[in-house]
Amino acid sequence: MMSKRFVQAFCVVACALTVLVGFATVQPSGWLEDYHRLEHIGGVPLEQVWVAPDFDVRHYHTLYIAPVQVDQHALRNRGERSREMAQRLVTAFRKSLNRTLQEAEIFRIVSTDPYFSTTKHGTLTLQMRVTEFSPGCAPVRALIGFGAGATKIQVEGKIIDNATGEVVAEFADRRMHPGGALVLGVRTAMDSEYLIGIDLKQLIDGIEKLFIFLREEGPLGNRL
């Protein structure tokens, strides 16, 4: 029978590996304008970000969040259940992001109403696309863990100035969730939709913190 000390040490290692597997290297899909200019911004929990040097978010009062697209390439060789899961997740993700950014009060108006996609002066549009999606392998994740059978999702985003049509910021974030049956329990570890939802919730936090950073720091030109 395993000692209590061994079990505690094993759980610590499992937790550490869960954190380490969370972030993964972005795989360029070709949707963003330039992947080479993406880099990490300290304090913003998004893997890769680019912001136009003269972009000042404080000059905008409205943010329209467009429907989140799921790239068909990301769903190739996926069954109908995975396609339905992806659609449920991005629908909930957009709704939750909309509510989070409304509560953050960075903009006077944050909306998913298509009306705001047509307004020009002082309006930004946030476009996002899922360019990688995998529910992983639940049995492997639950029995082996430590990254085996991990879920995967990559979301790429563009912030566009409605008045000019110019892309003023881009970001990409790829995450893998190992499940961690020892930490989360077997039932949770096998729930791919729940695990991907956790990563999308963290992505919402990253997007919110990006906007807050831009509001507090202003244009980044003098830092580049």
Image (spheres, rainbow, N blue to C red):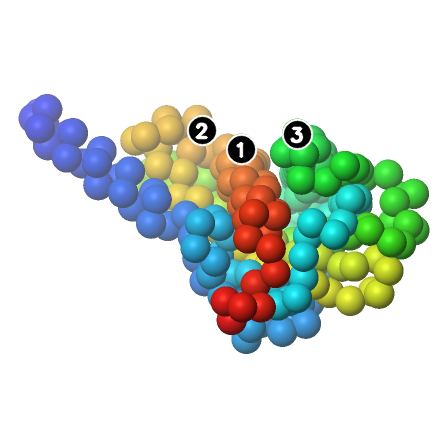
Q: Which is more toward the observer, 199 or 52? A: 52
Q: Which residue is mark 1?
A: 194
2 or 3: tag closer to the N-terminus: 3
Return the x and y of residue 26 as percentages of the image width and height.
Answer: 51, 63
Residue under label 2, please give it.
188
**On screen, residue 199 above or below 55:** above
- N-terminal of the pair, mark 3 or mark 1, is 3
As rendered, which of 224 and 88 lies closer to the eye?
224
Q: Residue at x 35, y 37 (%)?
A: 180
Q: CA distance from mark 1 to mark 2?
A: 7 Å
Q: At 27% across and 43% down in the image, what residue appears?
A: 16
| Kind of residue at badge 2 | Thr
> In whole angstroms, how far apart are the C-alphas of marks 3 and 1?
24 Å
Q: Is residue 69 visible?
A: no
Residue 207: horizontal and vertical position, in percent?
Answer: 59, 46
| 76 sits left or right of 202 in the view | right
Q: Are marks 1 and 2 in contact (CB under 8 Å)?
A: yes
Q: Secondary structure at mark 3?
A: helix
Evaluate if marks 3 and 1 touch, with contact meaning CB atoms under 8 Å apart: no
The picture places residue 70, in percent across and down from the top left corner, at: 71, 52
Residue labelled with disc 3? 103
